Amino acid sequence: MVNGRWSMCSRITDHPLTINHQPLTSMKEAVMSKRRLRIGVIGCGGIFRGQHLPYYQKSDLAEVLAVADVDKARAKEVAEKLKAPFHSDNPNDILKRDDLDVVDISTHPENHCALTVAATAAGKHVLIEKPMCISVAEADDMIAAAEKAKVKLAVAYPLPFDPAFQRVKDLIDKKAIGDLVSLRFTSMSFFNAPQHPWLFRKEKSGGMFVENTIHWINAFLWWGGPVEEVSAFTKTVPCHAAYQPVDGAIESEIVAILRFQKGAIGAMTQSWSARLGSFEAGIVGSEGGINFTHTKFTIKAKGSDKVEEIERSKTAGADAKARCLEHFLRCVLDDETPCTSGEVGRADVEVAEAAYIAAAEKRVVELPL
């Protein structure tokens, strides 16, 4: 929704992430008195090309001036699509420019911290693809760097900007399903991406839980508040060549159990080695519940005999990402705190890191770390 405004979020005690939205005048009317933000892009992989690029092609808030990717041909292709006058295979060529306001980073997770610290030191606001980074220590460095430079830092999470997920948040906050009892997420798939070998190396992606499941960690903390305990089990099944050698490969299976400060519990199960795929998630309330599939949310509210169904469009993910990008740019222009700030990203990474510690040390891990 490029031509519409998403109002700034308000912080809540339990978790600094809540979204409200209101239609406004057209975006062109809203920014007539303000210049467009000048964007530098670092990383032009599939996520950027599929979700960031379409937004920037239509945005009235931003213009992309420079693009960098390790694949110079890909950087050139993206620069041409965005009518950006400069492209390079060196991220430093972006960071050293003094004509940029924002750097959009969509590289491998292993580079997120170093690039963010360098970008903020150069006075640029930073929007980072998920995951924010691969450790709490890195998250702390990124937050400190942004605070020192007095610039904005946010993670490009789409789910908080998806109307169906926002409806769930609203139902929970209004106790429309009673008290929150439990949350669950199960995703079974056979994931083999030979074109992305880095995904399966622990030192590069951080692991499946922090690189991929982080979307649902983010949603769980948004809905349920802070987590106080984490236990987990992981397993690596060398089901294709990307997991060889097993030493240093990421987990292909994880089961994590979360206990929230408010008393709810959460269960997260994910597999990248399942030959028969499935997906299911849901929430149990003391007087109702919500079930999820990729395409439909089913809601049973308290005091009602009816079951409500919310259909999600095939473009829900891309639409939510566009709202996320627009929200961040608006926060930069209006000097507001982004809803998916560095603190939000850190909280999610902390849960993932706690799960890895719990699995490795065979114990329940208490938060904060």
Image (spheres, rainbow, N blue to C red):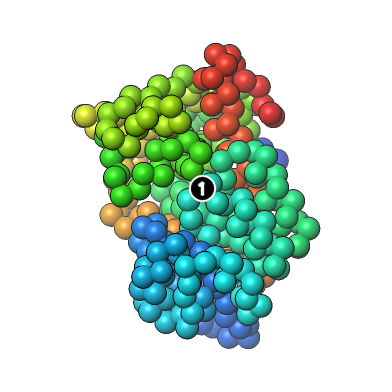
**Residue lying furthest left in this view?**
276
Residue 224 rendering spot, x and y as whole percentages: 56, 34
The residue sitting at 28% across, 54% down in the picture is: 314
Q: Is residue 315 above or below residue 96?
A: above
Residue 62 rendering spot, x and y as whole percentages: 53, 76
Q: Is residue 217 left or right of residue 18?
A: left
- Residue 297 sits in which quadrant? top left
* Residue 237 visible at all: yes
Q: Is residue 205 above or below residue 60?
A: above
The residue lying toward the viewer, choosing from 340 and 89, is 89
**Residue lying furthest front in this view?**
245
- Classify 10 Å Cα crowding around label 1: few (below 14), some (14-19), many (20 and above): many
- Residue 270 sits in which quadrant? top left
The residue lying toward the viewer, choosing from 144 and 266, is 144
Q: Which residue is mark 1?
A: 109
Q: Amino acid at mark 1?
A: Pro
The residue lying toward the viewer, choosing from 58 and 298, is 58
* Residue 54 visible at all: no
Q: Is residue 34 above or below residue 133?
A: below
Residue 265 rendering spot, x and y as whole percentages: 53, 23
> Mark 1: which secondary structure?
helix
The quadrant of the image that shows the C terminus is top right
**Residue lying furthest right in this view?**
148
